[in-house]
Amino acid sequence: MKLPKKLSGTKSFKTFMEPIWGENPISIQMLGICSALAVTVQMKTALVMGLSMTFVVSFSSMIISFMRKIIPRNIRIIVELSVIATLVILIDEFLRAFYYDISKQLSVFVGLIITNCIVLGRAEAFALSNSPRLAFIDGLGNGAGYGLVLVTVACIRELLGSGKLFGFRIVPEAFYAAGYEDAGFMLLAPAAFIIIGLLVWLQKSITGD
Amino acid sequence: MDNLINILLDSVFVGNILLAYFLGMCSFVAVSKNIETATGLGFAVIFVLTITAPVNWLIYHFLLSPGALKWAGLPEIDLSYMKFILFIAVIAAIVQALELLIDRFSAALYAGLGVFLPLIAVNCAILGTSLFMVERSYTFVESVVFGFGSGVGWMLAIVSMAAIRMKLRYANTPKGLEGYGITMIVTGLMAMAFMLFSGITM
């Protein structure tokens, strides 16, 4: 096994890494916040949502990139939307068949991947002018960047809000016996907004923008 | 009647589509910089929601839901998985048609609303309202009220946000929190305020 000498120098690697930190869709570009907040009460739903999103954005980018030379310019949005909606239907049916509970908890938010600006944004800005391979990698990167923010927010909310991670108790019983209480506020909608705001602040302070 | 008033109150305040379900955040952050544009977009959203929710209700109940095709002699067919693709197509078509109609009949209204209409087609609040309507199995009249209420709730949120952001210009925000960061935190505080409405029923 020989790793390429300069993996970090290749274009694919850059395409993959950029959306994870420097150009993160949620925390830097402010895209796709809609669904990001609602599913982050628990790690499990956040993770499933992140994976679904990665699937949809990478494959839709790849398919659209394959068709980029035959799509007429005027109707490209409709074509893009139908590709995306088809992939979302696949994911929704898959979740309902194999993970019914999670699909119930995610409720309408899987369907809302269709109108998530990240997917359409990547199709418009990247897939239409790049090769299918690069478009796929770009999609993977954006999905991962999105999932990363979701999981971070969910980690904070589930740990502080119910003392659990993935449904397993993390905060020991002894703490509760000693008077510790879960911050129920973390499970409510306002907490999600505030955590995202603080995360953006943290990232901007680190990058020094 | 009580039921309808409850749905209206709930969709405007307690179950505010933006502050409780996070829908339509992208345009909310981008367009809430000044009050006039925020008001314009708000009215456009109310307008589009009040039309798309009932139209999608008709589509769902006469074409897609399990057993809906009985009138065509096909009672076993369940097309409900097609709702995503059909709803988004209907929304895009209605938005496009509205744009043409408004442009044709009222230049003044077009100047105010026209620029916002294309933006609305991909606003998650619109698709979200249609999906919630199916999930909560509203009746036709309820779906009209729910669509209108969600629109009013969204407009209320974006216009008050725009007003707060105007004031925020003079505030001494920490560097790095300016713009996006502080907007999210203020939205969080607003969401908290709206939660106080919970428990109000007629």
Image (spheres, grey):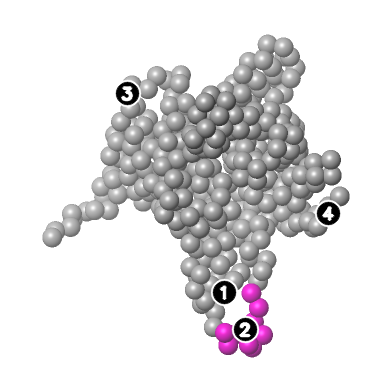
- Between the residue at mark 4 and the residue at mark 2, the CA separation in whole angstroms equals 33 Å
Stretch in magenta: A173-182
Q: Position of residue B30 (x, y in %)?
A: 62, 39
Query: How much space separates mark 1 and mark 4, taking CA atoms?
Result: 31 Å
Front residue (pair A172, B73):
B73
Looking at the rendered structure, the secondary structure element under dot 4 is loop
- Which element is circle 3 on? loop
| The label number, if any, that marks residue A163 in the structure image | 1
Q: Are marks 1 and 2 on the same chain?
A: yes
Q: Report which residue position mark 4 lands on.
A: B200
Q: Are marks 1 and 4 on the same chain?
A: no
Q: Was residue A178 drawn as part of the magenta stretch in this picture?
A: yes
10 Å neighbourhood of mark 3: few (<14), some, or many (≥20)?
A: few
Q: Which amino acid type is marked by label 1?
A: Gly
Mark 1 lies on a secondary structure that is: loop
Report the chain holding disc 4: B
Is the residue under label 2 in contact with that under label 1 (CB below 8 Å)? yes
Q: Is residue B186 visible?
A: no
Q: Nearer the viewer, residue B87 or B20?
A: B87
In space, the residues marked 1 and 2 are separated at their CA atoms by: 10 Å
**Which residue is labeled 3 in the image?**
A69
Q: Is residue A7 visible?
A: yes
- Amino acid on which the number 2 mark rests in the picture: Tyr
Which of the two discs, 4 and 2, sits closer to the camera?
4
The residue pinned by badge 2 equals A176
